[in-house]
Image (cartoon, rainbow, N blue to C red):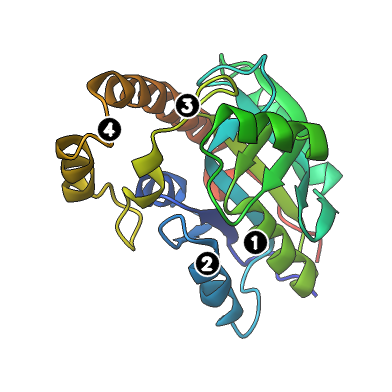
Amino acid sequence: MIDPTAPVLAVTGLARERRMAAGEGVEAVGAGGNPHRLRSLLDARVSSGCRAVVSFGIAGGLDPSLKPGDVVVGTGVVSEDGRRAADLDLSAALLNLLSSSGARVIAADLAGVDTAVLSVEGKTDLRATSGAAAVDMESHVAASFAGRHGVPFAALRVICDPAGQALPAFAAQALTADGEPDIAAVFFAFARGRARLGDLMRLARDSNAAFASLGRCRARLGPGLGIPAAER
């Protein structure tokens, strides 16, 4: 039985995503963009403790038509373990609420990976093999957890880096264990020539667009991330 009074569990990667998702009727968790640590965190829960699971945050673009700030409501998650479908009713609820958010909103599959996809070639290959519109490092873990506990799953991801743009090589290591930006790692990458000023400026611009859009989506969703309470 799903407890209709239980919160929605928002599964995030970055600390900023976690803070944004939290609120009335929502328990937000994250593991600093580390899927292995996220699995351990979720596995430690004796029960799901929630009425639904929502993967919430930013993502990398795989569909070349998507720009920073565009929104993907997941129809399913494709990973090495296969495809897990999202709950149709939950996804429809998200799409309905976000239709007037001002952003471009599409319904499409997401790809879930354990290792960051940094290159344009890697994104192109993943698009070809998965058919997904975007990629992140939490949705597949969240979907698996929801499946094990028999609770519905949905995903809301906003494009940060588009398909035709590579991420700087240091980006995968530029986070603390709690998902905060690791300023020292960025500084040393820049000092050692592993990061260029233009790359940092472009990443900051795209990140600002993504988080601004994610914030508008969060405001539209309201309590419980807009997920209707389950029937008793």
Between the residue at mark 3 and the residue at mark 1, the CA separation in whole angstroms equals 25 Å
Res 141 label: 1
Are discs 1 and 4 less than 8 Å apart at CB? no
* Residue 11 in the image, given as x and y percentages of width and height: 55, 56
- Dividing the picture into quadrants, the one containing residue 136 is top right
Are discs 3 and 1 less than 8 Å apart at CB? no
Residue at image point 22% right, 49% down: 185
Q: Earlier in the sequence, mark 2 or mark 3?
A: 2
Report the side of 104 relative to 213 (left or right). Answer: right
* Residue 25 visible in the displayed image: no
| Residue type pointed to by label 4 | Ala
Q: Which residue is mark 4?
A: 195
Q: Which residue is mark 3?
A: 216
Q: Residues within 10 Å of mark 1 (few under 14, many from 20)?
A: many
| Residue type pointed to by label 2 | Leu
Between the residue at mark 2 and the residue at mark 3, the CA separation in whole angstroms equals 26 Å
| Residue type pointed to by label 1 | Val
Q: Earlier in the sequence, mark 3 or mark 1?
A: 1
Q: Residues within 10 Å of mark 4 (few under 14, many from 20)?
A: some
Q: Earlier in the sequence, mark 3 or mark 4?
A: 4
Are discs 3 and 4 less than 8 Å apart at CB? no
Q: Earlier in the sequence, mark 2 or mark 4?
A: 2
Q: Which residue is mark 2?
A: 38
For the residue labelled by badge 1, is the local secondary structure a helix, a strand or a loop?
helix
Between the residue at mark 2 and the residue at mark 1, the CA separation in whole angstroms equals 7 Å
Residue at image point 58% right, 27% down: 120
Is residue 193 positioned above or below 213 on the image? Answer: below
- Dividing the picture into quadrants, the one containing residue 9 is bottom right
For discs 2 and 4, the disc positioned in front in the rendered view: 4
